[in-house]
Amino acid sequence: MGKYRSAYTPQEIMDIMDEDPIYFEGIAASIIGKNHTDIPDILQDSRIDLWKKFTNSETRGDAKIKSYIGSVIVNRARHYRRKEIRKKEIINPYEEISDFIMDIPDTRNSLPLEKLQREEQREGLKACLERLVPIHREILFMRYFREMSYEEMAEVAGTKVGAVKSRLRRAKENI
């Protein structure tokens, strides 16, 4: 199709996607890779997004509809890619942080009372981390254990830099 029109029904959008599935699969594959198993999911989620959009408002102005569908697929594929990056980056930060805290060597020759106090501090820090919501634990983990920049953290979390800074501040306050 690709013609200029002022309105499309949801069913017409689905028909356009059905007419040229290879084209739309190629768009998703260009973002997440040709052999990726999530391409059908991306296309299905894009169909749902489009269905909702065109059910609520059937007008798209005079934009080429195929280009618009492609942009929806690109956005959905980027969302999937961010999700994959996040899964790889943040497997279980709590366990890694907890292990790190517990493995801090006691390098000083200290009295038994000082050793006990340090052990209590470690346990207290571990308890504080347990009380944090997962996103705050992840943000702390990315910043202080992976030493990621705010921009990298935003990419992994799939959010804006301002939101990352805000979450980091709240995480620190909650500790």
Image (cartoon, rainbow, N blue to C red):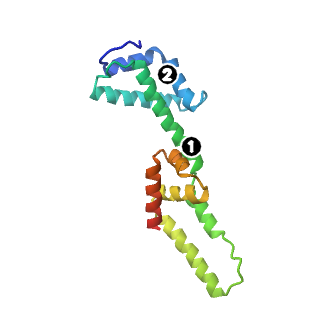
Viewer-closest of 11 and 53: 53
Examine the rendered structure and indicate whether residue 82 appears above or below residue 19: below
Element marked by disc 2:
helix
Examine the rendered structure and indicate whether residue 18 appears above or below residue 126: above
Examine the rendered structure and indicate whether residue 57 appears above or below residue 7: below
Q: Which kind of residue does numbered mark 1 sit on?
A: Ile
Image quadrant containing the N terminus: top left
Residue tagged 1: 85
| Spatial separation of the CA atoms under disc 1 and disc 2 | 23 Å
Numbered badge on residue 3: none
Viewer-closest of 49 and 171: 171
Element marked by disc 1:
helix
Q: Residue 153 in the image: state x and y as whole percent.
A: 53, 50
Residue depicted at 62% across the width and 87% down the height: 113
Q: Which kind of residue does numbered mark 2 sit on?
A: Phe
Residue tagged 2: 24
Relative to 91, 103 lies left or right: right
Q: Tell me whether the residue at label 1 lies in contact with that at label 2, contact meaning CB atoms closer than 8 angstroms.
A: no
Q: Residue 166 in the image: state x and y as whole percent.
A: 43, 56
Q: Sort mark 2 into few (<14), some (14-19) or many (20+) by Cα contacts within 10 Å.
A: many
Q: Sort mark 1 into few (<14), some (14-19) or many (20+) by Cα contacts within 10 Å.
A: some
Dot placed on the residue nearer the N-terminal end, 1 or 2: 2
Residue 19 sits in quarter: top left
Residue 122 sits in quarter: bottom right
Q: Residue 109 in the image: state x and y as whole percent.
A: 72, 83
Relative to 25, 3 lies left or right: left
Residue depicted at 65% across the width and 86% down the height: 112
Residue depicted at 67% across the width and 87% down the height: 111
